[in-house]
Amino acid sequence: MGQFDMVRRSIFDKIFREMQSIHFRLDDLERSLSGWSPAPMEIPEAKLIALSDHLRKTYMTVASKGECDANGVSGLTGRCRALESNYLNQLCRMGWLNKRKVSKSTLFYLAVEKGPRTEVAVKEVLSSAMPFRHVGGDFRKYFSEP
């Protein structure tokens, strides 16, 4: 009878240790996921139509993940990493995404101002149009920040 109790106790100890291990792993996952919570973004369909199909697929993948690198995007889209890296950099140049370097990898995330940078730049230039007819005096006031 004593040997049976020892076997049962050792089985319960193994189960208890495994449950503790699972508990610790779940705590680690919860900690890592609690810091990352991208708010769902409203992306107007009219703007998405402006993108070509291959870029739209890449953009929607980044939008759904919040922030990812070319490897992560390629795993979700099924295309090779080099191709996704090219598409992500195109989206950055167009102003749809921003990127930041973390160690050796480059992470891409949605830009605050979605849309081509040229449109934003043209609007800024037109909105801050200033007279350049200047006769004497200090012209630095035209170039200072408001």
Image: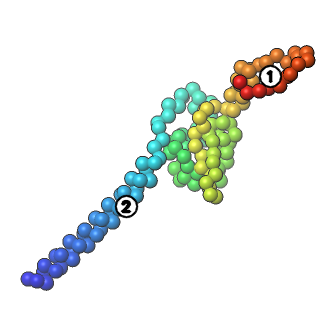
Residue type marked 1: Tyr
Pair 2/1: label in front: 1
> Which image quadrant is residue 6 in?
bottom left
Residue at x 82% of width, y 16% of height: 131
- N-terminal of the pair, mark 2 or mark 1, is 2
Residue at x 75% of width, y 24% of height: 125
Residue at x 48% of width, y 41% of height: 38
Foreground residue, 43 or 27? 27
Q: In this view, does 106 lie to the left or right of 27?
A: right
**Whether residue 132 is visible:** yes
Residue type marked 2: Arg
Q: Is residue 11 left or right of residue 92?
A: left
Residue 116 is situated, as x and y percent measured from the top left of the image, at 67, 32
Label 2 and label 1: CA atoms lie apart by: 59 Å
Where is 23 relative to 53, above or below? below
Residue 71 is situated, as x and y percent measured from the top left of the image, at 57, 54
Q: What residue would you read off at disc 1?
A: 142
